[in-house]
Image (cartoon, grey):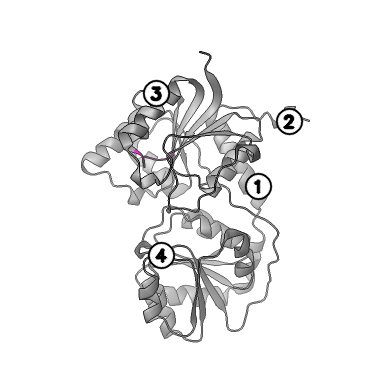
Amino acid sequence: MKKREYDIVYLTNTPSFYKLNLCEAIALKGVRILLVLYGYGAEAVNRKLDPKCLNFDFEFIHTGDSNRRNKLATFLRLCRLMRGIRAGKVIYSGWLAPEYNLYSLFSPKSRNVVINESRADDIGMAGLRGRVKRLVVGRMSGALPSGRPQKEFFDRLGFRGQVECTGSVGLFAKGKRSPRMEMNRPPKFLYVGRLIDCKNLEFLVRAFTKWSHLQLTIVGKGEDEAKLKAIAGPNITFTGFIDNDRLAEVYDAHDVFILPSKYEPWGLVVEEALYRGLPVLVSDKVGSGPDLVRDLHSGFFFQHDDEQSLRWAIDELFRTWPQTKRRVLGIDWDSRESDQIAAYLRILGVQDKSSFYP
């Protein structure tokens, strides 16, 4: 039987919209991509896949809830699938799936590339899990960290393969912008994401309840919603979940985005907020902070468990508002997107074929 040929086989978890957008953009460069998934899950906003609307192929090795999959069964399905495929490179979306980790032992090292979206300090390397991660990394010829804190993991391990920072974890939908220079009075702060413990929203709600002259909007749903509403002051508004295609108007109505997480490997929502023209305040645990906040001078950091630190960050943003706002509005998003795609093409050794097409 003739094998199907792909430049890239991308092994990931669920069809997150930002991964699909990235695959589509790379495919439009003339790259043949097969995206392999193991179901749908609530850990990110998933999109139903329609092959008629995509320029790349996809396969599910499990359908339904990704958290309910039989890992041995999905590993065997993956092996059967890969027997019929000739791949230039196999991309592993981190070490989140045991079946993918196991498959890396059977795939030639020269074609294996791993993505890392987690800060070096957040990747536990103790015990059995640490040994597994070292083993997996040892089976890789290349790595795609999303930023500097993610690249540091490979530096610490003394990784000798090719490393290309992507600058993000995927591509968000940009759309039309209508940013403002002026600030609302009173200023309006915004959080968008799940209402769960690792997002540190109890800390944020308690702080803003004390600062009643500041307006905070919380967009999203999650298991902590009732608890947060019970302690929130009247200056805090909960909207519930809002579809992505309606979020633009929410961003445009606010001035500052806050991400107070206790744990945040990257934080694509920071990019979305910056694109919409909002300066950002992020905790010291947000993985995109060094690349998107410090390097771009787009906002300020605060200690995730220190109200005085958050208050300082707010005051500094108000003090520097005109210059910070101008820097945010001046970010070149087309270049950032092109650089991300180029990082994949370089590490995969795939030529940009888009110029060959009319």
Q: Is residue 48 above or below residue 136?
A: below
Badge 1 amino acid:
Ser
Q: Which residue is mark 1?
A: 335
Q: Which residue is mark 4?
A: 222
At x 29%, y 47%, the residue is 124
Badge 2 amino acid:
Ser
Instruction: State the residue lying farthest toward the front.
Output: 64
The local secondary structure at tag 3 comes to: loop
Residue 31 magenta-drawn? no
How far, Cα to Cα, is label 1 from label 3? 34 Å
Badge 1: how crowded within 10 Å, few (<14), some, or many (20+)? few
How far, Cα to Cα, is label 3 from label 4? 39 Å
Residue 27 on image: x %, y %: 62, 34
Q: Which residue is mark 2?
A: 355
How far, Cα to Cα, is label 1 from label 2? 18 Å
- Which is nearer the N-term, disc 3 or disc 4? 3
- Which is nearer the N-term, disc 1 or disc 3? 3
Residue 77 on image: x %, y %: 39, 29
Magenta extent:
93-97
At x 68%, y 56%, the residue is 175
